[in-house]
Amino acid sequence: MIARERIRPADAFAATNVTLFLLMAWLVYYDRLIAYRGYANVHEFFIYACVILAVIVACWWWLRKADYPGWLLLLLQVGILAHFAGAFMPIESGRLYDAHVLGVRYDKYVHAFNAFAGAAFISHLLGLWGARLPLKWLCVTGLVLGAGTVVEIVEYLVMLTVPNAGVGGYDNNMQDLISNLAGGTLWSAVAAPLVALARE
């Protein structure tokens, strides 16, 4: 008799977010995309949906057996929910993503927060794998920027190939990467040393 493998926190996290994404896509995102960008841009919806689902499944499959502290999964979940809020929460001028707080678009805060959470995640994985890197903080920030760059490349390709796509152009890509740099650096310079002190 084959023993069944226990459900790990990463399994629950991935299942929750796949379910959340599919529900939001079905109940909200598709209709908002049609209203906001027009039926002609439905391809944009399917491109993003497929990329996001593929990334979630690939990350889950590759990383599911590692142990993750609750605070880290919570940090990642807040970043995901902040993204959904930006895309789906309507405001007078359109979406929450288009709102400005202290002169900065909400979108940039989400990028910075998710880069912060991503840096925490990468730092945790490097610790689990026993990686001893010189200038670890610089490596973590570089990996966060690399992951963010992949997202920006996808957005840029969508902008080039889908008429009237809802993503920005070159300036928006650069601003997103600057926000990612700020979030990754904030983790490496401030939060990571505090977490290390708390573990001692």
Image (cartoon, rainbow, N blue to C red):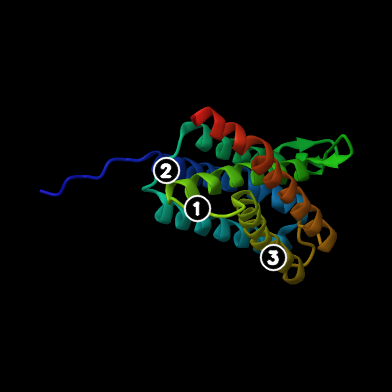
In the image, which disc is placed on residue 37?
Answer: none
First in sequence, mark 2 or 1: give its number: 2
Rendered location of residue 180, percent (x, y)? 71, 50
Q: Using residue 68 as the reference point, say whether residue 123 is left or right of it.
A: right
Tell whether label 1 touches label 2 (CB within 8 Å): no
Rendered location of residue 190, percent (x, y)? 67, 36
Where residue 100 sits, quadrant-wise, is: top right
Q: CA distance from mark 2 to mark 3?
A: 27 Å
First in sequence, mark 1 or 3: give its number: 1
Residue occupying image coordinates x 48% and y 48%? 125
- Residue 83 visible: no
Number of residues whose C-alpha sits closer than 10 Å to that of mark 2, classed few (under 14), some (14–19) or many (20 or more): some
- Tell me the mark number nearer the camera, choosing from 1 and 3: 1
Residue occupying image coordinates x 44% and y 39%? 68
- Tell me the mark number nearer the camera, choosing from 2 and 1: 1
Q: Amino acid at mark 1?
A: Arg
Q: Which secondary structure lies at badge 2?
A: helix
107 is higher (above) or lower (below) than 159: above
Q: Observer-nearest residue: 169 or 126?
A: 126
First in sequence, mark 2 or 3: give its number: 2
Q: Which secondary structure lies at badge 1?
A: loop
Number of residues whose C-alpha sits closer than 10 Å to that of mark 3, classed few (under 14), some (14–19) or many (20 or more): few
Q: CA distance from mark 1 to mark 3?
A: 30 Å
Rendered location of residue 143, percent (x, y)? 61, 56
Q: Using residue 107 as the reference point, say whether residue 146 is left or right of it.
A: left
Question: Can you identify the residue that label 1 sits on?
Answer: 132
Question: Can you identify the residue that label 3 sits on?
Answer: 153
Question: Can you identify the residue that label 2 sits on?
Answer: 10
Where residue 173 sits, quadrant-wise, is: bottom right
